[in-house]
């Protein structure tokens, strides 16, 4: 079984598509950024004075890719080269994943299936600089009691 997006090739084109999708939806500000230290691709935008930050871990994707494609001595590369290949593909794949997820959320809003706030609740940026999800996790508010 293949890992979704493991054969993606669009990378930068997917990021350009994200910008077009969000501009077409009416967002005032749109930007993308690569956080090399954290290993994340970040998309930020503003819609009707609501700031949104979406992060996708390419390190996490690379780890999943390596589980699906473990290194063996039969490969024509070193283990380090294999890991570099995983990261390189992950950097491309998360762009396509972000594009499709954002496109799906925006479509859900446009057809009335969800409100904008409902679609992006966890990613809404609060005045503190944290997202709603980060606050919920920090305050341990998502723990389900039995």
Image: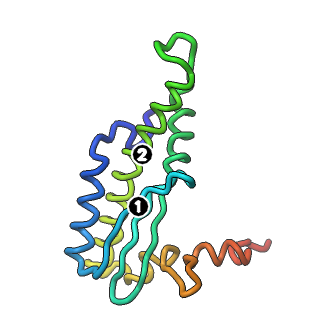
Provide residue 114's location: percent of width, then percent of height: 38, 80
Provide residue 8's location: percent of width, then percent of height: 32, 41
Alpha-carbon neighbours of circle 2 within 10 Å: few (<14), some, or many (≥20)?
many
Compared across the picture, whether 45 is left or right of 40 comes to left
Dot label at residue 87: none
Alpha-carbon neighbours of circle 1 within 10 Å: few (<14), some, or many (≥20)?
few
The quadrant in which residue 111 appears is bottom left
| Residue located at (34% from left, 36% from top) | 7
Compared across the picture, whether 142 is left or right of 73 comes to right
> What residue would you read off at disc 2?
91
**Foreground residue, 96 or 81?**
81
Mark nearer the N terminus (1 vs 2)? 1
Farthest residue, direction right: 146
> How many circles with numbers are drawn on the protein?
2
- 98 over 87 or under it: above or below: below
Q: Nearer the viewer, mark 1 or mark 2?
A: 1
Compared across the picture, whether 2 is left or right of 14 comes to right
Provide residue 79's location: percent of width, then percent of height: 56, 22
> What residue would you read off at disc 1?
33
Calculate the distance from the C-alpha at mark 1 to the C-alpha at mark 2.
12 Å
Farthest residue, direction top: 74
| Residue located at (41% from left, 85% from top) | 50
Provide residue 96's location: percent of width, then percent of height: 34, 51
| Residue located at (50% from left, 45% from top) | 61
């Amino acid at each position: 079984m293949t890992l979704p997006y493991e054969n993606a090739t669009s990378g930068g084109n997917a990021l350009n598509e994200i910008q077009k999708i969000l501009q077409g939806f009416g967002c005032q500000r749109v930007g993308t950024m690569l956080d090399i230290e954290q290993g994340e691709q970040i998309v930020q935008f503003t819609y009707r004075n609501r700031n949104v930050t979406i992060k996708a871990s390419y390190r996490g994707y690379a780890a999943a890719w390596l589980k699906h494609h473990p290194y063996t001595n039969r490969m024509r590369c070193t283990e380090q080269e294999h890991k570099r290949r995983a990261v390189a593909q992950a950097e491309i794949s998360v762009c396509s994943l972000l594009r499709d997820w954002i496109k799906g959320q925006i479509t859900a809003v446009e057809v009335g299936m969800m409100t904008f706030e409902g679609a992006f609740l966890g990613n809404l940026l609060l005045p503190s600089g944290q997202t709603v999800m980060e606050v919920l996790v920090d305050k341990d508010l998502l723990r389900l009691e039995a």
